[in-house]
Image (tube, rainbow, N blue to C red):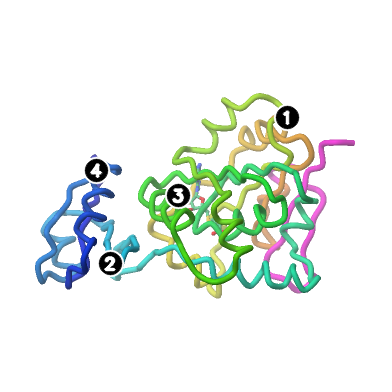
Amino acid sequence: MMRAIATTGRRNQRGSIELAREAAARLEIEFVDRRDRAIEELARAYGVDEIIIAKKNTLRLLTLDERGEVREIFFHPSTAHLRIKALRLGDGDRMIDAMGLTEGMRVLDCTLGLGSDSIVASYVSRCEVVSIEINPLMAYVVERGLRTFEGDGRHVIEAMRRVRVLNADYIDVLRAEPADSFDVVYFDPMFRHALERSSALNVIREAADHRRVSVEAIEQAKRVARCRVVLKENARSLEFERLGFKKFVGGRYSPIKYGVIELDQ
Ligand SMILES: C[S@@+](CC[C@H](N)C(=O)[O-])C[C@H]1O[C@@H](n2cnc3c(N)ncnc32)[C@H](O)[C@@H]1O
């Protein structure tokens, strides 16, 4: 069993208990009656550092770092929304350029995280995007958000619904996929040297898997992709060289860069 529990907010809104129970059953973790206990108190009492909270029909994942500081992860398509808005206004998107993505292409996103890149890819490709996340709690919270989030922006909602989440280690998925089964395989690993300004990712720091991408994963990705393998990293990262990326997309002054391996020529 994972070291995690599922519970509700302090004030039980209608439906929260069912939602927390459903999450606990699906994730095979314990459901706990919150009563009036603080998160830190629950974490201590149950010896866990990850807690799923059901509140107002949404799920949140709370993580505690080594200093006991609480971070809250929940699904929200705001970043994807802004990028899609820019695309609709005719502005570019570096990730999309790096992927060479157009309508009808199939993307395998090896690193789902909070799902923004998957949503933008799905918006452009108009196709299902398959996205892999190794942390089962995060995969569940984001998958449920992609499936149920309602708001304005029909294009964003449609793109969200086309993202299919797999809770797995991408190396296992890549090894099992037949050759040429996707057009693009994409990696956005946790940066080797975290950029402090990237606060969106600070939130998932505790929950995320920080292992570096292996040479084997890139070799497998080259077999599985028909057109391109793309890696997003810190602009000055040595990972590009280690993994054999020689072509790049990224603004001159941008702190991040996309490495591209082209396969179809
Ligand atoms: C930097 S985040 C991705 C952010 C994402 N592109 C977005 O738009 O929100 C990297 C994610 O990949 C996940 N990850 C790392 N190694 C993995 C692996 N071997 N298999 C699947 N997911 C992995 C981490 O847990 C983390 O959630």
Q: Position of residue 33 (x, y in %)?
A: 11, 59
Q: Residue lying furthest right in this view? A: 265
Circle 3 sits in a helix, a strand or a loop, which is it?
loop
Residue at position x 62%, y 44% from top? Answer: 128
Q: Residue 16 versus residue 260: which sits nearer the camera?
A: 16
Q: Residues within 10 Å of mark 3 (few under 14, many from 20)?
A: some
Circle 4 sits in a helix, a strand or a loop, which is it?
helix
How far apart marks 4 and 1 lie (CA) works out to 36 Å
Q: Is mark 4 within 8 Å of ligand 1?
A: no
Q: Which mark is residue 55?
A: 2
Among numbered discs 1 and 3, the one appearing first in the sequence: 1
Q: Position of residue 60 (x, y in %)?
A: 34, 63
Can residue 38 be seen at all in this image of the molecule?
A: yes
How far apart marks 2 and 1 lie (CA) works out to 42 Å
Q: Which of the 4 quarters of the picture holds residue 110?
A: top right
The boundaries of the magenta stretch are 242-265
Q: Which mark is residue 180?
A: 1
Q: Residues within 10 Å of mark 1 (few under 14, many from 20)?
A: some
Q: Nearer the viewer, mark 4 or mark 1?
A: 4
Q: Position of residue 229 (x, y in %)?
A: 72, 43
The quadrant the C terminus occupies is top right
For label 3, the residue is 209
Q: Residue 135 versus residue 206: which sits nearer the camera?
A: 135
Q: Position of residue 4 (x, y in %)?
A: 24, 51
Q: Nearer the viewer, mark 4 or mark 3?
A: 4
For label 4, the residue is 25
Q: Is mark 3 within 8 Å of ligand 1?
A: yes
Could you tell me the amino acid type at mark 2? Lys
